[in-house]
Image (cartoon, rainbow, N blue to C red):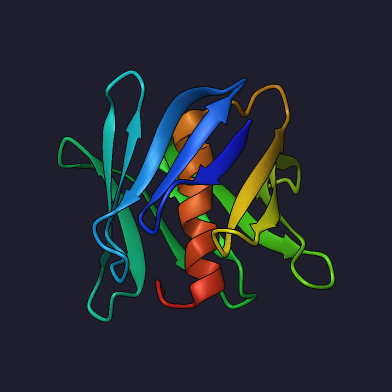
């Protein structure tokens, strides 16, 4: 699987050249976004809280996930049923991003590849056999964009 930035607002998730879903920002300066999957599921992402201290994800107006920064500089992703995951950057120049569960097991690894013609990052994705969740992968890209820009939380 890989993530390709289509334009300033849109990232597409593809596998074998087939589009599986996309992450679309409302505008190029906004933190509000939408994840759309090929099965027509739509998820809304928006900052929340008094000081916009965390981000929530809703589907049909029901909160299904939220994330915030912890004191270690990691994004903590909390999904329904009290499942927590941690986004960590690895490598000297943050050459990889890894999502781990509470037990420290690597779930997904996203490796950024800089596209000089579009002056943006695309991502190669590797995962364990249980982590082929398209929604979760696109949410991880949103989290990485937040962490890189430091403008989300």
Left or right: 36 as drawn, with respect to 117 = left
Residue 72 in sight in this render: yes
Query: x, y percentage for residue 69?
Result: 50, 70
Q: Nearer the viewer, residue 53 or 145?
A: 145
In the picture as drawn, the residue positioned furthest to the right comes out as 92
What residue lies at 64% left-to-right and 47% top-to-bottom?
123
Question: Viewed as shown, does residue 110 lie left or right of 137?
Answer: right
State which quarter of the image contains the N terminus: top right
Give the percent coordinates (x, y) of residue 101. Answer: 65, 45
Visible residue check, residue 69: no
Frontmost residue, 1 versus 61: 1
Residue visible at 71% across and 63% down in the picture: 89
Question: Quick check: 3 left or right of 127?
Answer: left
Expressed as whole percent of the image width and height from the top left, the position of residue 63 reads: 26, 45
Give the farthest residue toward the left.
61
Q: Where 67 falls versus 29 (above or below)?
A: above
Q: Residue at x 64, y 62 (%)?
A: 116
* Residue found at x 73% / y 29%: 128
Q: Position of residue 118 (x, y in %)?
A: 54, 59
């Amino acid at each position: 699987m890989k993530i390709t930035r289509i334009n300033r607002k849109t990232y597409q998730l593809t596998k074998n050249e087939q589009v599986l879903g996309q992450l679309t920002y409302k505008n190029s300066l906004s933190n509000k976004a939408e994840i759309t999957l090929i099965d027509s599921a739509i998820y809304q992402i928006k900052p929340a809280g008094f000081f916009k201290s965390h981000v929530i994800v809703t589907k049909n107006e029901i909160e299904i996930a939220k994330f915030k920064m912890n004191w270690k500089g990691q994004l903590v992703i909390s999904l329904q049923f009290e499942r927590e995951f941690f986004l960590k950057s690895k490598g000297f120049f943050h050459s990889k991003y890894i999502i781990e569960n509470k037990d420290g097991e690597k779930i997904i690894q996203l490796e950024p590849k800089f596209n000089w013609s579009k002056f943006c990052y695309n991502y190669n994705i590797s995962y364990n056999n249980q982590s082929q969740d398209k929604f979760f992968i696109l949410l991880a890209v949103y989290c990485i964009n937040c962490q890189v820009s430091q403008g989300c939380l």
